[in-house]
Amino acid sequence: MGSDILILTVYFICVTYVIYQMALSLEAQLEDQVNIRLDSDLLLAEVENQLEQQRRYPLEAQIMAGGKGGPSSLSLVFQPHSPAEKKPPSSVINLLVMPQGTRPLQPPVPAFTVQVQNQGRDLQLYLDWDRSSISRFNNQGKRVIRLIPGMPQDLGQPQVFSVVNGGQALSCIITFEEAFVRNANGLMEAKVPLVDLERATEMKPSQQTFSLMMLLWLKRTVDGDDQAIRLLVPFRFNIEVLPGKVALPVLSWLLDR
């Protein structure tokens, strides 16, 4: 009887050791991750404050939160007064800036992706790239460059506005000016990533931010440019380092020993 207990004890020790090593092996294969979170409170407060100072149009700002951890976007709701209708019609312009959400440390974030949907009937939206700016890990503003095929050799040239008329959508990629280098063909290419996430994880939490300050012009098509509303929209992102996940949750107590 005593020998049977000894055999079982040795057996369970061996099994536990094998499972422990398996858990360590799987844990080593897990990638560290971060969560890139849009500062929605700042975004909404700043846009509402600017709309309050420019009451030329009945505009309301809203934050559209993505379900199940999806990306958040800014919606500008245009609600013109219509006495003939009990409920006035509304038009919506939606602005989404990526990246957002959970992602591994590699690869780095190459650039911003800006997506705009103009569901307005008679609204025009202009994106002013030369008066927008990007900051990375600090408050130093950097010039925004929109990536287009066959980048010009001189990045100092003025950039045309991107125009999104009613019923249209726009998707474009932008980065900061210093990211560009000249390739063998003499064309400019973006080589420096927008955000090095591995570097960001080594910084103080207060420095783990990057942002896009995007200048928008918004007006009705029947109005002149002098009637346009100008909004400097702050898309600021915080990088949150996620705690390490256990490869086999039921064995987490093993990894703590």
Image (tube, helix red, strand yellow):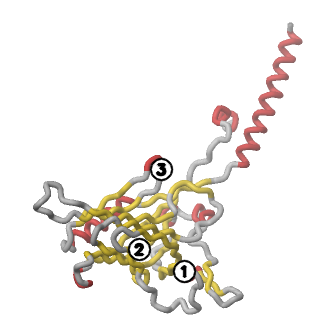
Locate residue 188, reporting x and y percent.
61, 85
**Nearer-N-terminus badge (2/3):** 3
Q: Residue at x 58, y 66 (%)?
A: 109
Relative placement, left or right, of 166 versus 145 is left
Kindly report the distance in space between the C-alpha atoms of the residues bearing marks 2 and 3.
Answer: 23 Å
Which corner quadrant of the image does residue 139 belong to?
bottom left
| Residue receiving disc 1 | 148
Q: CA separation, marks 1 and 2?
A: 20 Å
Indicate left or right for 150 with 206 as reference. Answer: right
- Is the residue marked by circle 3 packed among few (<14), some (14-19), or many (20+) residues within 10 Å? few
Considering depth in this image, is 94 or 88 the residue closer to the camera? 88
Q: Are marks 2 and 3 in contact (CB under 8 Å)?
A: no
Disc 3 residue type?
Gly
Q: Which mark is residue 82?
A: none
> Furthest residue to the left?
83
Q: 200 or 145: nearer the eye?
A: 145
The residue carrying mark 3 is: 69
Which of the 4 image quadrants contains residue 77?
A: bottom left
Mark 1–mark 3 distance (CA, rounded to whole Å): 31 Å
The residue that appears at 83% across and 28% down in the rendered structure is 14
Q: In terms of sequence position, does the residue under pointer 1 or pointer 3 come before the other?
A: 3
Q: Nearer the viewer, mark 1 or mark 3?
A: 1
Q: Residues within 10 Å of mark 2 (few under 14, many from 20)?
A: some
> Is label 2 in a helix, a strand or a loop?
strand
Provide residue 236's location: percent of width, then percent of height.
43, 66
Q: Position of residue 169 (x, y in %)?
A: 42, 68
On screen, residue 144 above or below 210? below
Q: Considering only vertical position in the picture, is 87 above or below 80?
A: above
Who's the residue at 26% across and 84% down the image?
225
Q: Amino acid at mark 1?
A: Ile
Residue that badge 2 annotates: 213
